[in-house]
Image (cartoon, coloured by chain):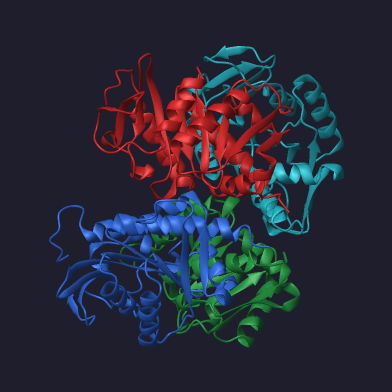
Chain colours: A red, B cyan, C green, D blue
C-alpha cells in the first residue's frame, strides 16, 4: 500500500468492513467494491481490485489509482465500477471513502420502488446514524438508477443525480447494489449498516 | 473504569453483550446503548459513550456518570438517551443493568402495534426467560411510546408508563428500539434475547 | 464430569452443540437443555443445569443424575424438564442423547399445525438425515403436544405419544420447543439441524 | 490426500467452503458433498466421504476415487451421489470442482418452479458472478430435475439435461439441492453464493 496514513491503514479498514459485510451476505460471490480517497489533488485512491472475495481481503487485493483510473501501485485489474467511485469523489467534497454492496433486501426494494424513482425512508430513529441527520423525522431519499454495463453513461447519470439531490447519503443501482460514502471508512460502513437495516424494515413490510 | 466490582468488570460484560448483539444485527450502525448501575445512593452508572460501534467496545468507550449525567470518569459524550437510563434506574429498584437495542422485527412490531399501545405477548414458553415469570400462560405487555428527540419529555412519559405498568420487563420506543433491564447484565441480556425471539415469532405471523 | 467415556467427553460435545445452536438462535435466553445417557441400568445421565446460557457451556454447567433426577455429581438445579429426558430414555432404547431447542420457525409451526396434531414432513431429500430414513419419499410425523408447566402430566403424555408413534425422531411441545434424540450427540445434533431446516422450508411457504 | 497440487490443497479448499456454507445453513445435517477433479484421463477425483458434518471437514473426510467410483485412497464410503459428480465432470470439460448444497430458498424455489422446468433468473447484476456472464441482462436457466434415489437413472437425466442446456452453470434436484461447478473451487464457491443470493431474491418476492 502506498498510503502513508497512520494505523489502521485504509486497506486494513476496508478489509475489516469486507469481512463483516461478507458475513452478513452483503458482498457475496466477490461482489461489491470499496475505496478510500488518499489525496484529492491530484486525486489518488485506494480501491479493491476486481474479482477478489470480499470476506478475505489482503493488502495485495488493493490498487492505488489516479483520477484516470491508471494504476500507480498494485497488481490486478481495477473494477469497471472504478469510474463511479471517481465521479462520486469529484462531486462530494466530504466523501473520503465509498462502499458498494449487494444485498437481498436492497436488490428487491430497488426493483419494487424503481417506478417511484427512489427508496424513501422517513420516521425511523436509525436515520440518525446517517451523517448530519439529527432527528428520526428526517426523510432520506435514495435515488434509484437503472443498471447498465455502460459505465461512462452511468457516471453521467450519477453526476446528474447527485447534483439534483443535495444531501443524499447513497444511491442505488437497480437490481444491482448500493453506493454510499462517508468522511471515513467508519462513517461509510455505518451508512451501509443503517441503509441495510432500513431496507430490511421496509422490505419485510411490503405487501 | 472506576467500577471496583470483581471480574468480569461491568464494561467487559457490556462489551460482550455488544459483540453478540452486533452479530445478530440488533445494534447496527453504532446504534444502541448499554449501562450498569455502579451505586444507587449517590447514583453512579457506567454507560457507553455516544457514537461507538457496539460490536467492538473497549474500556475507553465507557463513561462513569452521576445522576445528573455529569461525567465522573472517561472521555467522550454521554448519549442523549442517558436520561432514559437514569429514569429507569430511579423507578425500578431491581434494575442494575439496562440494555437498549434496535432490531428489524422490533421496529416493525412497534409500528404495527402502536395503535394498540403495546406489544402483547402471551402463551409462549420463552416468556419464562423473563425474571419472575413462572408459566408460559403469562401475558407480557411491552408498552410502546411515541419516539421523540425531546429526551426530557420522553423521560416524563417513561416515568408515567413505568408507574402505570407494574411488573413490565421492557418498553419500546416506536420505530426506534427496545429498553429492557435486569438485576445483572446477564439478566438484561437474557431479556433482550427473549424479547427479540418473541418479536420475530409475532412479526413473522403478521398478515 | 463423572463420565468416563473417551474424548470428546459428553459435556464437551454438548457444549459444542450449544455454541452452534446459540449462534443460530435456537437456544436464546438460556432456553433449551441437553443430555447424554451415561449408563442405562442403573440409569445415569449428564444434563445441563438450569439457567445457564447455552452458547457458553462449561463443565461446571452440567449435572450427573440418576433416574429419580437425584444429583450424583455437580452443582446447580436440574431443569424441570429433566423428567421429560428420563421418559424419553426409558422408552427409546436407541436414544443416548437428547437435545431440546427453541426456534422461531418451530414455535410458529407448532402453533399453526396444532389442530392437525403434528407437523408432517414428506418428500424432502433432507429427511434422509434422520437416522434410518432411506428415501426422500419418507413421511415424518412430529407429534405436537400442548405445553404445560405440569411436567409429571407432560411426561405421561409424552409416554403415550411415543408408544403410539413408533419410529418418530422428535416431538414438539406447542409454542415451546423441539425434543429430538439420537444414538450419539452427533446424531441428535444432526436431527436438530434437519428438523430446523425443514421447519423453515415449511414455515416460509405457509399462506 | 493424494493430490500433489500446490497449496492450498483441494481438501483444504473444500473444507474452507464447507465451513462457510455450514455457517450460512446451506449444508446442515451433514448434507451436501464437494469434489475436485485431480486428473481427467484417467479420471481421479477428491470427494467428501458420506456422513460427515460439512462445517468441520478434515483431510480424513475425503476420498480419492477413479471414474468407476472405486476408492484409490482414504477411508469411508463415497456418497451415493458420487455418480452425479462423475457425470458432470465427463460432460463439462471446464468443470474441475463441483459443489452440492442444500438451502431453504433453493428447496422452496425448486418446488414452486418445478412445473416450469427451471428456475429462470434474468436482469440482476449478480449474474455477472457466473463465469463468462458479461451483463446483468443475461438470462440464466437452472434446470430442475425430479429427485430420485435411483442415482443411475438420475445420472442419465443429468446427462441429457446438460447436453440440451449448453452454457448452464448449475442444476437443481427438486426439493433436494443445487449442483454447481467451476474451473476452480473458488469459481464453484462463487457460483454457489451467486445462486443462493438470487434464489433468496426470487424466493422473497414470490406471492
Q: Is residue D72 above or below residue B63?
A: below
Task: Tell me residue C89's x, y (percent).
Answer: 52, 76
Q: Residue at x 67, y 50 (%)?
A: A204
Q: Residue at x 66, y 83 (%)?
A: C160
B174, C175: nearer the viewer: B174
Q: Is residue B61 visible?
A: yes
Q: Is residue C68 visible?
A: no
Q: Is residue A203 above or below residue C203?
A: above
Q: Is residue D161 above or below residue A35?
A: below
Count of picture labels: 0
**Quadrant of the drawing holding the C terminus of chain B:** bottom right
Q: Residue at x 33, y 18 (%)?
A: A5
Q: Residue furthest left?
A: D4
Task: Tell me residue A143's x, y (percent).
Answer: 62, 35
A4 vs D175, left or right, is: left
C72, A89: nearer the viewer: A89
A70 vs C109, left or right, is: left
Q: Quadrant of residue B96?
A: top right
Q: Quadrant of residue B180?
A: top right
D188, D91: nearer the viewer: D91
C200 vs D42, left or right, is: right
Task: Tell me residue D151's x, y (percent).
Answer: 37, 84
Task: Tell me residue C5's x, y (percent).
Answer: 34, 68
Amino acid at each position: 500500500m502506498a498510503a502513508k496514513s497512520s494505523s489502521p491503514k485504509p486497506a486494513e479498514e476496508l478489509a475489516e468492513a469486507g469481512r463483516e459485510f461478507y458475513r452478513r451476505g452483503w458482498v457475496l460471490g466477490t461482489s461489491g467494491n470499496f475505496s478510500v480517497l488518499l489525496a484529492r489533488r491530484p486525486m489518488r485512491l485506494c480501491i479493491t481490485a476486481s474479482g477478489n472475495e470480499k470476506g478475505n481481503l489482503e493488502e495485495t487485493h488493493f490498487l492505488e489509482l489516479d483520477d484516470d483510473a491508471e494504476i500507480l501501485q498494485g497488481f490486478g485489474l481495477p473494477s469497471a465500477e472504478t469510474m463511479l467511485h471517481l465521479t462520486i469523489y469529484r462531486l462530494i467534497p466530504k466523501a473520503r471513502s465509498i462502499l458498494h454492496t449487494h444485498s437481498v433486501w436492497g436488490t428487491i426494494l430497488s426493483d419494487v420502488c424503481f417506478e417511484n424513482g427512489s427508496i424513501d425512508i422517513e420516521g425511523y430513529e436509525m436515520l440518525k446514524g446517517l451523517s448530519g441527520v439529527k432527528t428520526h423525522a428526517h426523510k432520506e431519499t435514495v435515488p434509484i438508477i437503472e443498471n447498465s454495463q455502460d459505465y461512462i453513461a452511468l457516471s453521467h447519470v450519477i453526476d446528474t443525480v447527485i447534483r439534483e439531490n443535495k444531501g443524499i447519503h447513497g444511491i442505488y443501482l437497480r437490481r444491482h447494489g448500493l453506493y454510499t460514502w462517508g468522511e471515513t471508512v467508519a462513517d461509510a460502513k455505518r451508512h451501509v449498516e443503517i441503509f441495510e437495516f432500513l431496507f430490511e424494515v421496509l422490505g419485510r413490510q411490503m405487501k
